[in-house]
Image (cartoon, rainbow, N blue to C red):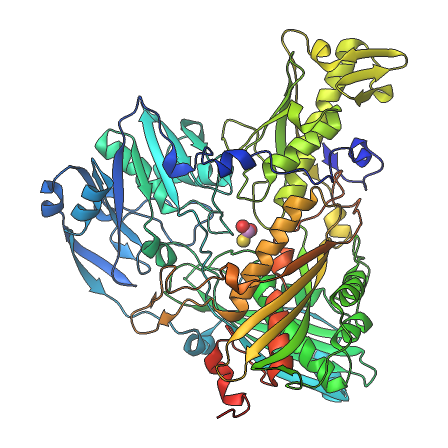
């Protein structure tokens, strides 16, 4: 199905099933431990062996030699696979650094060997016996130093942008602000570690893994192995979180496949937690400079956002200026990114790449500017709303209700304007409130599905879409149920298998809208097949309560299926509606914090998010996405930071003891409100993404609340107590 004109009324608009708060259809499997995650797959007919990976202990250089003789003789060891003996392999389309093979070391904890043994413990113990001799080379690990040598990234992919004359407008603006903000390297820290099982059968291999994007992984694994894609069967039906860390093929899958080849046995490989943070990807640190100029009345006349980040050679910048191109009006503007070469582990996508760290900076800057202007920060944002792309005013937004989010949020939160910083105190607690705007683009990727109507009246959906904890199973069941006139109990959903039609996958908050639109397209085909089979005119047919009706004829779906059943398969493809119109999602975050006047410890007291993201397909799963994202934003504001050893080039705190993510006690009260809206430009579902929007702007709202509580403006995340304590009143 080609989607190139705005959606009109369609069966989804009935909202008998879609839009309803239906609990996760996979919830019972998960809460009873029966949902099989990658490492748990078990076929009693197979005799599994266990692989334990070894990571490089230098950040840059070459392996001279590896002595694996002791490891090979250790109890239970079946095989040892080393990078030098595997040799240089072709890199996949989506990886910046090589995952495995050859003697070059590109980053710390890059995988250099796998030991396969009868048990996990034997493999781990033998891995410790491997001796490696390296030639270490000097690397660059410090972004502050490296930013001096940063260059313009690929002009085609990430061009500098401008409109009007920023320099002149900024110079003549009556009120201006200019500040620099920093965000640290962050780790996805998903619950389920990267894990894979591989089993060869002749020249074909089956891989159970934990992947957000089945088809990307399959393609890159085929490239690595230099085999036909058809020889690889990839399965990833349940995923314990990804946040972008499982978007691209990872080494656990590669090692499981190589290990199984060497051991001539099925092999299980998981990355040990302490290896993950340096072996895999992370959200790169940024240094961001923001300048804003405005009239006395609060109208922005000039706005500039520049961002510096680093990555491995051939890497990409963190696109932290994205939102500043689109979020606020202002005739004179510029954005630019500069990319430094760093030899830290590969930087890459983490939940809302670009906007998440970009808004951490921009939404503090907006708060600072509002204060300079003597305006309420909610009012200042409303004054500078735009209904068109400010860089290309001929391009309107498809639908934009940032103002609605700010106004409703202010009302529900009880935002009465903020008092002076440091003015509100309850016992030992300094209390403050803060606001931040949320913004994230809505991306459209092709997505396919197959739907089968059986003679039992059950519709089975098959697509290689993944559910990374987001609720894909449920919203896909709701979509098929709505289209076919059934309840979700009459829909079976099978996901995450490379034998199914290629979907959009889970990433960039495009999964929900795109994958359900693909299921919609397949159901349109199935409805046609049913109508045709019954000799109904497909324009005049209704699917209701398990029946197909046309005129005064009514046939149960189970009967229409016939003994063979009927199948519909299609892929949704996108026209120009995301080029002629800017498709984005919007929100407003309101936060109240307390800061302990003696210790500088910050406690979040309450959080509210109001989101405008098109049709909400399921308010339960959507809310879970947003509160999870708000929690992640609390981590970003207060605790999360990969500490860089700038001499040896690695992240020091590479486990969940050292890298602190929020726990329940950190998050006392969260509320989420969805604006009641649809976006007919986005898809036949009229929905947009929500999974990343919830993270965008929330850390800045917390930072702004801390400033309001204490009068201390911290511009370097995370806002730990050492950055506050010097500015707090003397209580001794
Ligand atoms: Mo997302 S960072 O595209 O999983």
Q: Where is residue 687 in the image (x, y as percent from the top left)?
A: 73, 45
User: Does 146 sit above or below residue 351?
Assistant: below
Q: Residue 429 vs residue 684: left or right?
A: left
- Residue at the front extreme of this rendering: 427
User: Does 563 sit above or below residue 651?
Assistant: above
Q: Residue 375 vs residue 461: left or right?
A: right
Q: Where is residue 537 in the image (x, y as percent from the top left)?
A: 85, 15
- Residue at the top extreme of this rendering: 563
- Residue at the right extreme of this rendering: 551
Q: Nearer the viewer, residue 208 or 317?
A: 208
Q: Residue 709 vs residue 540: left or right?
A: left
Q: In which quarter of the image is residue 564?
A: top right
Q: Is residue 318 visible?
A: no
Q: Can residue 2 be seen in this view?
A: yes
Q: Residue 19 vs residue 356: left or right?
A: right
User: Does 716 sit above or below residue 280?
Assistant: below
Q: Position of residue 246 (x, y in %)?
A: 46, 47
């Amino acid at each position: 199905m080609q989607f190139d004109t705005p959606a009109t009324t369609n069966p989804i608009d009935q909202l008998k099933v879609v839009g309803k708060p239906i609990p996760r259809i996979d919830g019972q499997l998960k809460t009873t431990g029966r949902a099989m995650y990658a490492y748990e797959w078990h076929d009693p007919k197979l005799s599994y062996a266990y692989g334990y990976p070894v990571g490089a202990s230098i950040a840059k250089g070459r392996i001279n030699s590896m002595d694996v003789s002791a490891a090979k003789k250790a109890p239970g060891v079946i095989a040892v696979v080393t990078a030098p003996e595997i040799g240089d392999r072709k890199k996949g389309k989506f990886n910046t650094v090589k995952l495995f093979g050859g003697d070059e070391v590109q980053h710390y904890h890059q995988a250099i060997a796998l030991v396969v043994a009868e048990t996990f413990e034997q493999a781990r113990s033998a891995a410790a016996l491997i001796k490696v001799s390296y030639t270490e080379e000097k690397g660059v690990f410090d972004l502050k130093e490296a930013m001096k040598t940063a260059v313009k990234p690929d002009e085609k992919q990430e061009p500098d942008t401008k409109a009007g004359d920023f320099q002149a407008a900024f110079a003549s603006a009556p009120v201006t602000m200019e500040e620099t903000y920093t965000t640290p390297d962050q780790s996805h820290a998903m619950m389920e570690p990267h894990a894979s099982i591989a089993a060869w059968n002749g020249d074909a291999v089956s891989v159970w893994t934990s992947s957000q994007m089945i088809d990307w992984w399959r393609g890159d694994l085929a490239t690595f192995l230099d085999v036909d894609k058809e020889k690889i069967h990839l399965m990833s039906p349940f995923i314990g979180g990804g946040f972008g860390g499982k978007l691209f093929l990872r080494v656990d899958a590669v090692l499981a496949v190589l290990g199984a080849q060497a051991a001539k046995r099925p092999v299980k490989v998981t990355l040990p937690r302490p290896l993950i943070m340096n072996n895999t990807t992370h959200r790169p640190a940024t240094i961001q400079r923001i300048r804003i100029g405005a009239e006395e009345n609060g109208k922005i006349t000039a706005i500039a956002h520049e961002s510096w980040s680093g990555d491995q050679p051939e890497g990409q910048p963190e696109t932290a200026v994205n939102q500043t191109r689109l979020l606020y009006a202002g005739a004179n503007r510029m954005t630019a990114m500069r990319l430094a070469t760093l030899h830290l582990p590969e930087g890459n996508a983490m939940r809302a790449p670009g906007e998440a760290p970009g808004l951490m900076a921009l939404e503090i800057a907006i708060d600072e500017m509002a204060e300079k202007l003597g305006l309420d920060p909610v009012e200042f944002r409303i004054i500078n709303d735009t209904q068109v792309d400010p860089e290309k005013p001929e391009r309107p937004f498809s639908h934009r209700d940032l103002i609605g989010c700010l106004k409703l949020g202010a009302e529900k939160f009880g935002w009465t304007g903020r008092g002076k910083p440091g003015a509100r105190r309850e016992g030992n607690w300094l209390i403050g409130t803060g606001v931040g705007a949320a913004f994230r683009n809505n991306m459209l990727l092709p997505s396919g599905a197959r739907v089968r109507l059986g003679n039992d009246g059950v519709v089975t959906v098959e697509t290689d879409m993944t559910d990374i904890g987001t609720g894909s199973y449920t919203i896909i069941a709701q979509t098929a149920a709505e289209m076919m006139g059934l309840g979700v109990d009459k829909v079976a959903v099978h996901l995450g298998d490379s034998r199914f039609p290629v979907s959009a996958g889970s990433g960039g908050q495009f999964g929900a809208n795109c994958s359900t639109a693909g299921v919609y397209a397949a159901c349109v085909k199935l409805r046609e097949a049913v109508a045709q089979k019954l000799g109904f005119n497909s324009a005049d047919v209704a699917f209701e309560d398990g029946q197909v009706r046309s005129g005064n004829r009514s046939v149960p779906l189970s009967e229409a299926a016939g003994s063979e059943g009927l199948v519909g398969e299609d892929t949704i493809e996108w026209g120009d509606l995301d080029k002629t119109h800017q498709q984005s999602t919007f929100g407003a975050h309101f936060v109240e914090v307390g800061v302990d006047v003696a210790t500088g410890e910050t406690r979040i007291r309450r959080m509210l998010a109001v989101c405008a993201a098109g049709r909400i397909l399921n308010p339960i799963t959507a809310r879970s996405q947003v509160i999870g994202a708000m929690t992640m934003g609390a981590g970003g504001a207060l605790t999360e930071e990969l500490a860089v050893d700038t001499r040896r080039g690695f992240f020091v705190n590479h486990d969940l003891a050292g890298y602190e993510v929020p726990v329940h006690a950190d998050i006392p009260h969260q509320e989420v409100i969805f604006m009641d809206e649809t976006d007919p430009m986005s898809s036949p579902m009229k929905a947009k993404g929500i999974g990343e929007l919830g993270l965008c702007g929330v850390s800045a709202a917390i930072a702004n609340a801390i400033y309001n509580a204490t009068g201390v403006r911290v511009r370097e995340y995370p806002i730990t107590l050492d950055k506050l304590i010097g500015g707090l009143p003397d209580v001794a």
